[in-house]
Amino acid sequence: MARKYPMVSLSTLSATARLRHGWGMHPEILAQEGYTSISLDEAPVRELFPGIRTRRLWKGPNGAHANVLEMDPGTSWPRRDVHEPGPEEVFVVSGIFNDGARDYPAGTFLHAPAGSWHVPTSATGCTLFVFYPEG
């Protein structure tokens, strides 16, 4: 007769329980060159414009970088934001982002190719994850 196991979420198990069940931890992952992590609370805050802040999460050796951008309600970029030298990848984490043409709710991904532009604004406020693969 087959044994029945209760459904258990891995996130609810302690490290000891995961090891006991063969779902081992692999601390050597963290020793890999370039492997890094940062908490949003640890990322330094820089105000770009009144009510618009960026937090650098990571910068690679080729200039690629990842940021969190926070826009307070009613804020807007004061001019065109041109994507140079490469594209900009945006994921709307919370709130509603507007690129100057339309609204994008939380959960939306945008790809802006190199040389394109927009005028970021948010009536409600928003948090964005922004990645620049080419710096």
Image (cartoon, rainbow, N blue to C red):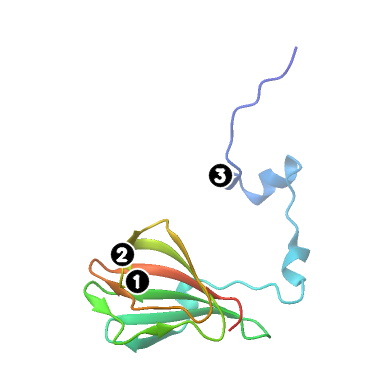
The answer to whether residue 53 is above or below residue 112 is below
Separation of residues labelled 1 and 2 (CA atoms): 6 Å
User: At 58% from the left edge and 84% from the top edge, which residue is drawn?
Assistant: 135
Circle 3 — which element? helix
Cβ atoms under marks 1 and 2 closer than 8 Å? yes
- Give the quadrant of residue 76: bottom left
Question: How many marks are shown on the rendered structure?
Answer: 3
Q: Label 1 is placed on what type of residue?
A: Asp
- Give the quadrant of residue 27: bottom right
Identify the residue under disc 1. 99
Tell me: 47 left or right of 16.
Answer: left
For marks 1 and 3 on the same chain, the one whose residue lies earlier in the sequence: 3
For marks 3 and 2 on the same chain, the one whose residue lies earlier in the sequence: 3
Q: Which mark is residue 12?
A: 3
Q: Which mark is residue 102?
A: 2
The answer to whether residue 71 is above or below residue 13 is below
User: At 56% from the left edge and 44% from the top edge, which residue is drawn?
Assistant: 12
Q: Label 3 is placed on what type of residue?
A: Thr
Q: Position of residue 133 (x, y in %)?
A: 60, 76
Query: In the picture, which quadrant includes the N terminus?
Result: top right
Tell me: 22 left or right of 131.
Answer: right
